[in-house]
Image (cartoon, coloured by chain):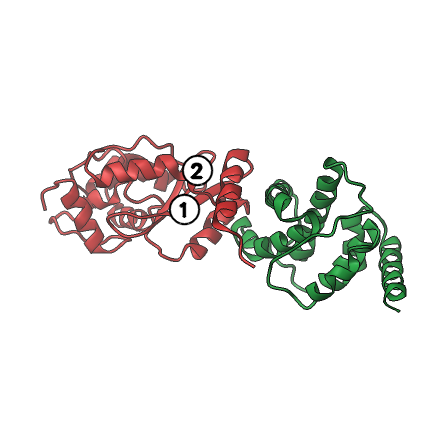
Amino acid sequence: MAPVATIPPFETFYAEHAGEVLGFLRRRVGRERADDAFQETFLRALRAYERLRHGEHLRAWVLTIATRVAIDAHRRAGEPTDELPDLPHHDGPTAYDELAFLTDALPAKERAAVVLRYGYDLDYDQIARALDSSPDAARQAASSGVRRLRRRLT
Amino acid sequence: MSVPTDLDERFRASAARSGLLAASYDVIESELGPLFAAVTDRGLARITFDPEPERELERVARIAGPRVLRAPRALAATRRELDDYFAGRRTAFDLELDLRGLPDFTLRVLGELARVPYGQTSTYRELAGRAGNPRASRAVGTVMNRNPIPIVLPCHRIVGSNGSLVGYGGGLERKERLLRLEGAML
């Protein structure tokens, strides 16, 4: 049996993921609302931290929480969640960032699935948890998102 | 990307206010150099002279659970009392202490240690006697060496029967400076 990663002190977890989570949220909800979403994400993580059974997949776990916080933020703002706004961002671009603008026009679920799969390398189980759906539905959302992108590009 | 300082501080302050932290810590600047200090909901749990908080962080997490965060706001009272102490304005601490998990003998010894007044010294042997076992001065030495909350629990006031300083977890130089600060006869 592979050794199970122990749960690190919250400080260590926070220090390791705070930057990436903030970048993720700036892209999802915009710079202005990202600060509040950032706080909300890590407070939710702190609240749930006690219930963690092991320290594996913490990156996927916190990105899942951030995804939900972003969806809630859009809902609160009264924005239709399947028409996410075109969001400016000013962070150092990752390889994925250069392609991110392509996904902006996708419906929310497809966009989230494509972003989490190809931008953040989460597997479909993890994406399913983030989107409150099944792994099959997550796979379907990602692949129809990719198909839609292909149609737009050709 | 790095998180802007003001956002980082805001999160740490809300975490401290939320009541969700099992323990908060900070590094406090002092006359004796940087001090690592950690508090739980029960009180001050740890002070060390260790300049590497990571190691202490793990230790605090083992006692209090993993929800440990650097949250300076939670250490406000500790910082204030230490500042006052080092400035000579305070001769006793009013902080609640969290000594959970320590063996009975250690708790008895630390309880007696807390009664040794500011500016005075006692010996390992005397302390052993007051803790109920006059022959346990060596064990008392070990308890002093592992004191989880030095300065506040004044192990610097315990010296050898011949008046020599003997030892100090934070180094003899610090022990001497604390005793001089308190005006103890050396």
Q: Earlier in the sequence, mark 1 or mark 2?
A: 1
* Left or right of A123 on screen, residue B162: left
Chain for numbered disc 1? B
What residue do we see at 56% from left, 57% from top? A16
Shown colour of chain B: red
Q: Quadrant of residue B88?
A: top left
Q: Quadrant of residue A117?
A: bottom right
Task: Pick whichever, B40 or A92, lies toward us.
Answer: A92
Task: Pick whichever, B126 or A46, lies toward us.
Answer: A46
* Left or right of B47 on screen, residue B160: left
SS class of the residue under badge 2? Answer: helix
Looking at the image, can residue A154 be seen?
A: yes
Q: Which chain is green?
A: A
Task: Pick whichever, B54 or A143, lies toward us.
Answer: A143
**Quadrant of the image containing the N terminus of chain B:** bottom right
SS class of the residue under badge 1? Answer: strand
Residue B74: which numbered mark, if any?
Answer: 2
Residue B26: which numbered mark, if any?
Answer: 1
* Left or right of B66 on screen, residue A78: right
What residue do we see at 23% from left, 41% from top? B86
Task: Pick whichever, B174 or B153, lies toward us.
Answer: B174
At label 2, the amino acid type is Ala
Can you give x and y, in whole percent of width and height, for residue A73 in the image? Answer: 70, 40
Farthest residue to the left: give it. B185
Above or below for A139 versus B7? below
Can you give x and y, in whole percent of width and height, for residue B159 in the image? Answer: 18, 47
The residue carrying pointer 1 sits among few (fewer than 14), some (14 to 19) or many (20 or more) residues within 10 Å by Cα, namely many
Farthest residue to the top: give it. B94
* Left or right of B29 on screen, residue B184: left
Query: Do the CB atoms of the residues marked 1 and 2 lie less than 8 Å apart?
Result: yes
User: From mark 1 to mark 2, how far is it between C-alphas?
Assistant: 9 Å
